[in-house]
Amino acid sequence: MQERYQAVVLGSSGLVAQRLQQRLMHHPMFTLSAVAGSSERAGSALLDIPWRLDDPRPQFPPLQIADIHDHGLPQRLFEMGIRVAFSALPSEQAQTLEPHWASSGIAVFSNASAHRGKEGVPLVIPEINSHDLRSFGQVGYPLACATNCTLLPLILPLAPLNQTFGLTQVKMRSEQAISGGGYRLMDEINELKHQFNSEIPGEAEKTAAELKHILAWDGPISIRCERVRRNDGHHVFVEATFDHAVTPNSAKACLEAWNASFMDQSHPSAPIVPLHIVEQIDIEKHLFSDGLSFEDAPNPALDLQAGMGVVVGAISCPNPHTVCFEGYSHNTLRGAAGGVIYLAELAASMDLF
Ligand SMILES: NC(=O)c1ccc[n+]([C@@H]2O[C@H](COP(=O)([O-])OP(=O)(O)OC[C@H]3O[C@@H](n4cnc5c(N)ncnc54)[C@H](OP(=O)(O)O)[C@@H]3O)[C@@H](O)[C@H]2O)c1
């Protein structure tokens, strides 16, 4: 029988922390054995922490939030058998806490941006650059990062198009959900009746750098990111130029062939296929794609594939070397908690911890 790893979630009341807790409740490979939160939350029962997701709060085990800033905690948890940590920390906290936790021997998989792209810390999207996980631990401790949530609906379609047609240039504009900015921003905007500041400082730069890193590509790129009034789901509008001539049919055939190469994968959080190709994206109906179907209101605690597919639509070619498409994906599932757990499933299957 497959080994189940005991896991700790770093973060107790945040949107991504709660997605992680939710997805670990019935996970076949990982057990939610501890939650470490800010000093403000430490000592509270997990069941008493305000629940921020729309789905029902799962029947959590009777855990008490540990203080993430307790220096000796990672070592004690390691000695108790905890082998994996999923981090949903703010970047400033992740900067020092993630290496400290990983130095105890616990394998840390992070949603924070602090260590993305750092030499010896793999920055990986399982379908695209799983080979980069081979450097796991090379920095001296076991730490790997998932990417920025905005990158997913852009790069998943772009990766196979690049392989086939040779990417020369990318332009992207995004419309991003407010949950992407954390629970405080989401509450604040939902309470506001009037306009809010739609800028997302630093998001375009992060997305461009991570795209170049993952694709090992260094062409011209122009990105504009904007927040819109919607709780979940990042929608991107892409214009990509290629070396080789391309038509809407050859672009679709390329994406479908790439999809077909994933049909046999068995990681619990992998979508049935990565790209869900549609004529037009419907941001209401297409939020929870599993790659092949759209569920209305799935329970992500039970259905690990819902919300893990990237929806691709409106594929067109304004000229023989340019493809325009739209991408759409769930930012706290595929773009955060689901994506980072998928990464850990992959690392476990490669015997990396
Ligand atoms: N939201 C998304 O769509 C998304 C997507 C990809 C990546 N991310 C990244 O995931 C991380 C979490 O994002 P989020 O949206 O969940 O944010 P959030 O809803 O604002 O939650 C913030 C989290 O940070 C923790 N925290 C705050 N101050 C802390 C401190 N001084 N020490 C230790 N922990 C502290 C909180 O822990 P307690 O609850 O224990 O107080 C809470 O879990 C961020 O790095 C973000 O960039 C988010």
Image: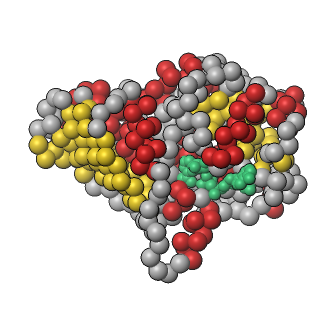
Left or right: residue 162 compared with residue 317: right
In percent of the image, x 20 and y 33: which residue is there?
242
Q: Residue at x 55, y 25 (%)?
A: 119
Q: Please report the residue visible at 60 percent of the width from the left and 70 percent of the height from the top.
A: 187
Where is residue 103 shown, x and y percent of the image? 76, 27
Residue 234 visible in the current orientation = yes
Horizontal placement of 14 versus 130: left or right?
right
Question: Which residue occupies the extreme left position in the image?
Answer: 319
Q: Is residue 343 visible?
A: no
Across and down, in percent, residue 325 comes to 27, 47
Q: Residue furthest bottom?
A: 193
Q: How is the image coloured?
A: secondary structure
Query: Quick one: 289 or 221, which is closer to the camera?
Result: 221
Q: Quadrant of residue 185?
A: bottom right
Q: Position of residue 303 (x, y in %)?
A: 57, 47
Q: Is 258 located above or below residue 322 in the figure?
A: above
Query: Left or right of 257: which side holds 176?
Result: right
Which quadrant: the N terminus? top right
Residue situated in front as seen by the camera: 79 or 285: 79
* Horizontal and vertical percent position of residue 155: 38, 39
Instruction: Tell me the residue at 31%/46% (across/down).
Output: 222
Q: Nearer the viewer, residue 315 or 302?
A: 315
